[in-house]
Each structure stands twice: as C-alpha cells, then as structure tokens.
Image (tube, helix red, strand yellow):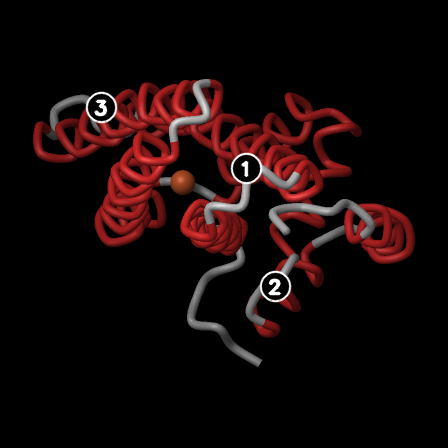
C-alpha cells in the first residue's frame, strides 16, 4: 500500500487534512445559523476549542522546533530562508483571524462571524497549500531521519499524554483510510492499542460541531 507520502511527512499531511476538515465543519456550522439552540452552541464551542488547540499546537511546533531546525541547514540560501519567513508570517496572519472568530462569537454577531470564518478559512487553506507545495519538499530535502525522529519526540513531549490523547483521534477522525493506516502503522504497538481501544472511543463520545 502506498499513499505517495513519506513516513517522515505523513503526520504533517494528516494534521493538515484534519485542520481542513474542521475548517469545513466550522463553515457549515456557521452557515446553519442555529447557535440560539443551546445544545448546538455547546457542540459548536467544543468543536471550535479542539480545532483552535490543535491548530495552535501545530503552528507553535513548527515555529519553535521545525523552521529553526531547517534553517541550520540553510546558512546562505536566501530563497529557502525567505520561504521559511513566509511560513512564519502566514502563521502570524492566522492568529488574529482566530481571535476575530472568537470575538464575533462572544458578541453573538452572525454577520461578523460569517465574514470572520470565511477570511480565516481562506487564509488557513492558502497557508496549508503553500506549506505542502513548497515547504514540505524543502523539509524532505534537508532533514535527516534522525531530525525527523527528534522533531516527533519534541512534539510528543510538548503535547504530553493529555495532548496525545486528543491529537491521535483528532488526526484519524474522518481520515482517508490509506493515510490513517500509514499513520497507525508508524505508532509503537502499545500506543496503537491505546489509541484504538481507549482514546478514539473517548473522543467519539464528544459532541463536536453538531
Ligand atoms: Fe504544517
């Protein structure tokens, strides 16, 4: 079985897919305009909180641990450094758009919320596409297997058990079956069992978005 994506970057594509999936959930929930219903509103807020947490954790991990690591291989390569600068700038542009959605929600302003959601989603999708098109090939070209292992280890350490308990079900939820199988195959067997038997069922009970 092959997904055409290397084992090094499959986690990256899996989290990007999950972020796109949740951006679509967000857009659909906002379009329905049924936030007056307390149960709908609660489900929406749970979905949105998980989405924000995963997005921020992903961007922070790249800003703190991934781009600096790639830069160590690029002392005199202006074009590649400019690309990494663009990645950081795009993350910075997305942050206030998250706040904008939050402020619109707090003000129960459906017009503002609809507009803020469209802008946030456009910016996020453009960034993910840019990263996959240009930054992922750069990562693949310069990072060694040891670098990838170290990056995964740091991400796991930063997230802790609590973070991992949410992260794995999050990226596997509604995932493309082949991509999910590749991700699962990379997990150490005890973790794989924990994800399947405990973390995914627990996550499935959460009423997110609807
Ligand atoms: Fe990414």
Secondary structure under the numbered disc 1 in the rendered image: helix
For mark 1, what is the residue?
51
CA neighbours of label 2 inside 10 A, class few (<14), some (14 to 19), many (20+): few
Give the camera-side residue of 201 and 132.
Answer: 201
Residue 174, disc: 2
Q: Nearer the viewer, residue 175 or 111?
A: 111
Farthest bottom residue? 1
The residue sitting at 32% across, 48% down in the picture is: 136
Q: For this rendering, which residue is in front, 118 or 12?
A: 118
Which residue is under mark 3?
89
Q: Look at the numbered discs 2 and 1 and tell me whether their residues touch, using CB distance below 8 Å.
A: no
**Is the distance from the Cβ of mark 3 to the nearest ligand 1 atom less than 8 Å?**
no
Mark 1 Cα-neighbour bin, 10 Å: few <14, some 14–19, many ≥20: many
| Residue at image location 31% in from the left, 30% down from the top | 112
Q: Mark 1 to mark 3: distance in Å?
A: 20 Å
**Disc 2 and disc 3: Cα gap in Å?**
30 Å
Q: Residue at x 61, y 73 (%)?
A: 177
Q: Is residue 98 above or below residue 15?
A: above
């Amino acid at each position: 079985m092959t997904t055409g994506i290397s084992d090094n970057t499959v986690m990256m594509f899996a989290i990007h897919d999950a972020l796109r999936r949740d951006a679509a959930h967000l857009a659909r929930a906002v379009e329905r305009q049924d936030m007056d219903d307390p149960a709908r509103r609660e489900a929406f807020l749970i979905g949105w909180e998980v989405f924000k947490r995963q997005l921020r954790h992903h961007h922070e991990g790249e800003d703190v641990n991934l781009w600096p690591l790639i830069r160590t291989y690029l002392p005199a390569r202006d074009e590649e450094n400019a690309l990494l600068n663009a990645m950081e700038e795009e993350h910075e542009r997305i942050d206030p758009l998250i706040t904008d959605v939050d402020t619109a929600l707090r003000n129960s302003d459906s017009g503002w919320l609809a507009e803020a959601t469209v802008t946030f989603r456009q910016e996020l999708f453009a960034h993910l596409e840019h990263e996959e098109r240009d930054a992922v090939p750069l990562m693949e070209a310069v990072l060694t297997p040891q670098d990838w292992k170290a990056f995964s280890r740091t991400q796991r350490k930063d997230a802790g058990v609590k973070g991992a308990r949410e992260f794995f079900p999050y990226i596997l939820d509604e995932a493309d079956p082949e991509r999910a199988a590749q991700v699962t195959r990379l997990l150490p067997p005890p973790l794989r069992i924990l994800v399947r038997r405990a973390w995914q069922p627990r996550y499935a009970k959460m009423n997110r978005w609807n």
